[in-house]
Amino acid sequence: MAPADTATTLICNGSLIDGTGAPPRDADVLIRGSRIEAVGPDLLASLPETDGVHVVDAAGCTVLPGLIDAHCHITFDQPSSNDELFFHRRHGLATLVASVNARKVLRAGFTSFFDADGVFEAGVDLRDAIEGGVVEGPRMTTGGNVLINCVGGTAARLLPDSGTRGYARIVHTPGEIVTEIHKQVKQGVDWIKVHVSGQPIRPAPGSSSGEIQPWSYDELKLVCDTAHQLGIPVVGHCRNASSTRDAALAGFDMILHATYMDDAALQAVIDHKVPLVPTFTFQANLADYGEAIGSEQRLRDMFRAEITDSTDALRQAYDAGVPLLTGSDSGFSLPPYGDWHYREREVYVEYLGVSPLEAIRCATSEGAVALRRPGELGCLAPGYLADVLVFQGDPLEDIRVLGDKNRFQHIIKNGQFVDLEADIPTQWDLPGWRVGEFSSQVLTRDLVRSMGGELP
Ligand SMILES: [Zn+2]
């Protein structure tokens, strides 16, 4: 293989979706080194020298920018419970396992992702290993531990009152907030993440939809001022109206979920044009396929309602020019790595009523914000980074085909072809890694009798 800075590739005869939302057109893509040099018709004829040019015939294929998952957790390794996530991960091993899982994301056509928060400093280490060519994976930006206070998050009483547990760093006072941001910036994070809302331990009678907001506006403003002074953007997990509103007003640079918005939250998001990553894949998977994994009906109904209760406001935000990015929350047992990254586009088309072409734009040029490279990533245009997919089929006819990994003829990241034949381990047996259950049922005497057992 020629060195990355000189290799030249020409992709011709494909139907080009450039990622801007423009309709498909017949155009070739010329890649030199890690960048796109030219996009247009009949580029082969325009080349003064064709020796050494790797020509890819994309006849019958769609050529599109590498997809961007703006909400992943690469270091979690698909836990099926908070117990497993918070108590069964080890620093070095989490990083090693993440380096394998990253390859699954890449093989699904996602050449970039944003890791919102991770266990230990594994995200920073993995990002640097990928950038440095030590391991293969999508380009990546990463947060560190999420800033949370002890009533925040999704882990209820599993969180201690202070310190670090799993991916969470518990902070309460302004001093703790500032110190933690300084430490994470020194570590090399790309984003600071805050769990602005969390599940109530004991919901108040008649309380409104979604989670509670354990952070005050002033605390959120302090986070933004501290991080922004150091040139680092801030992202929030906001799963109710007030947390979304206050995060937008405080200066957050991106909001994950943004569900259950009321008028005030919607107005704040529109006024500040805060990019949103609704991340409905988790809910849609649980609602549609939860039965297969034994999820209760009540839980499945609750997650579907989070989608349907939130789509009107999100659609209004989108129509008002708020960037919508697509994220999958991959890293839990649902959704696992490599399988469902595409599905957010399907949910956008089905629930938000955007066209497949718009859904692809959300996953490409809009997604570049999460990678902190807008104007440089997510489009097939001269000067852009050469993340390119050659895909057998037409995702505009049926957006779900993007989930069929066998259709990827080529996945190119940074001008380099990904080896689609190399084996990736799919499962592993690591001591103490998964939560071991004694049983799935309680062994009562009645149970034994019901199975025909003889008991006195
Ligand atoms: Zn998440």
Image (cartoon, rainbow, N blue to C red):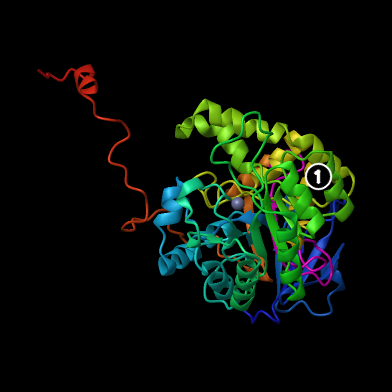
Q: Residue beneath label 1, please? A: 265
* For residue 369, side relative to residue 103 (left or right): right
Q: Which of the two residues, 258 or 337, is positioned nearer the viewer here?
A: 258
Kindly identify the amino acid type of the residue bearing the numbered disc 1. Answer: Ala
On screen, 448 above or below 335?
A: above
On screen, 167 above or below 260?
A: below
In terms of image quadrants, where is residue 438? top left
In terms of image quadrants, where is residue 221? bottom right
Task: Indicate the quadrant containing the N terminus: top left, top right, bottom left or bottom right.
Answer: bottom right
Residue pictured at 89% horizontal, 52% vertical: 271
Residue pictured at 51% horizontal, 46% vertical: 156
* Camera sees residue 57: no
User: What secondary structure do most residues of the magenta stretch adopt?
Assistant: loop
In terms of image quadrants, where is residue 294? top left
Q: Is the shortest distance between ligand 1 and the CB of mark 1 under 8 Å? A: no
Say few, some or many: other residues with alpha carbon within 10 Å of mark 1 (under 14 / 14 to 19 / 20 or more): many
| Highlighted range, magenta | 372-399
Q: Position of residue 132 (x, y in %)?
A: 58, 78
On screen, 371 above or below 260?
A: below
* For residue 187, side relative to residue 31 (left or right): left
* Camera sees residue 129: yes
